[in-house]
Image (cartoon, rainbow, N blue to C red):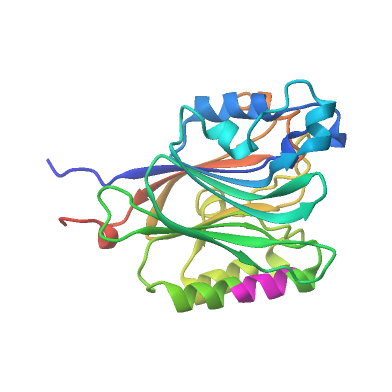
């Protein structure tokens, strides 16, 4: 019998700096436990608190290390973190957690104005069974439409310049794209990079992920190239994932991807 192509379970989650809605409660330990239970191969995290001395004084159980390190411990041996916002008490940004070795990574500053710091965290990963490295980008786009447009343009330009058009690629995170289909983001990523929205493939449209307790806006996405989407779930208020409802202000996404033949070794 032929060997099945390898699968990747991928999660994306806006961590809200490790705090609940309105910053009342520390949630990073709960998120850590729930992510460990899901055990995805890759975790894309946004609003990751790398350091915050003020919150460390306020919350008794504040982790000693960055939240990406705290979540990854004992489960994801490889990680990358890009600090986007720096301030007196610390910094926060995006992170990638991986079960597979990272070959290299770089955080690209794509801030559009001085009041909002943003970055694209681009990593390449050695995934067993693939002919070439898997490229990933963890994104958290700006709140203004002009910022998002500039950041998508920068992302497309960077990837066209740096990686082969047939290279496997996953772009995931918080796109802040409240306009949904009207914004043209998915169309641009499809037309210029050959990417598909994993949730749209299985459910007919992007996932509503904000606010987590009653998702209405389609902010969080997982876009893929070189993979077949086998399943896509929203980590929100339903019978399977109801414990996620009162954590971050965003609902996360969990997708299962199976590598297509053109990126497989020994085919």
Instruction: Tell me which secondary structure the magenta stretch mostly adopts.
Output: helix
Q: Position of residue 155 (x, y in %)?
A: 58, 71
Q: Is residue 69 left or right of residue 267?
A: right
Q: Confirm whether the magenta stretch covers residue 149.
A: yes
Query: Looking at the image, which residue is at 12% across and 40% down?
Result: 1
Q: Residue furthest top?
A: 60
**Residue 84 magenta:** no
Which residue is depicted at the point 60% across and 28% down? 32
The percent position of residue 177, horizontal first and vertical second, equals: 72, 60
Which quadrant of the rendered structure holds the C terminus? bottom left
Residue 96 shown left or right of residue 5 in the figure: right
Q: Is the residue 184 above or below the residue 46 in the image?
A: below
- Can residue 225 be seen from the camera position used here? no
Nearer to the camera, 171 or 78: 78
Q: Position of residue 144 (x, y in %)?
A: 81, 66
Residue 33 to residue 122: above or below? above
The magenta stretch is 148-154
238 sits left or right of 80 in the view: right
- Among the 4 quarters of the image, the one containing residue 266: bottom left
> Residue, x 72% and y 35% (percent of image)?
18
């Amino acid at each position: 019998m032929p060997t099945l192509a390898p699968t990747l379970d991928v999660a994306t989650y806006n961590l809200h700096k490790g705090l609940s809605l309105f910053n009342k409660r520390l949630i990073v330990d709960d998120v850590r436990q729930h992510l460990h239970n899901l055990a995805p191969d890759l975790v894309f995290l946004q609003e990751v608190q790398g350091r915050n001395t003020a919150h460390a004084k306020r919350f008794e159980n504040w982790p000693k290390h960055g939240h990406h390190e705290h979540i990854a411990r004992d489960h994801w041996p490889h990680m990358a973190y890009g600090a986007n916002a720096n301030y007196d008490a610390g910094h926060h940004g995006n992170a990638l957690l991986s079960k597979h070795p990272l070959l290299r990574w770089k955080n690209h500053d794509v801030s559009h104005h001085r009041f909002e710091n943003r970055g694209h965290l681009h990593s390449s990963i050695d995934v067993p069974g693939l002919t070439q490295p898997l490229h990933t980008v963890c994104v958290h786009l700006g709140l203004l439409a002009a910022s998002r447009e500039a950041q998508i343009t920068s992302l497309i330009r960077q990837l066209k310049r740096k990686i082969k058009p047939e290279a496997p690629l996953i772009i995931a995170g918080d796109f802040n794209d409240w306009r949904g289909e009207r914004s043209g983001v998915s169309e641009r990523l499809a037309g210029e990079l050959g990417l598909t929205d994993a949730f749209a493939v299985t459910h007919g449209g992007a996932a509503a992920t904000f606010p987590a307790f009653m998702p209405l806006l389609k902010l969080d996405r997982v876009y893929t190239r070189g993979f077949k989407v086998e399943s896509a779930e929203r980590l929100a208020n339903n019978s399977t994932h109801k414990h996620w409802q009162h954590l971050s202000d965003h609902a996360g996404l969990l997708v299962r991807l199976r590598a297509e033949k053109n990126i497989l070794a020994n085919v």
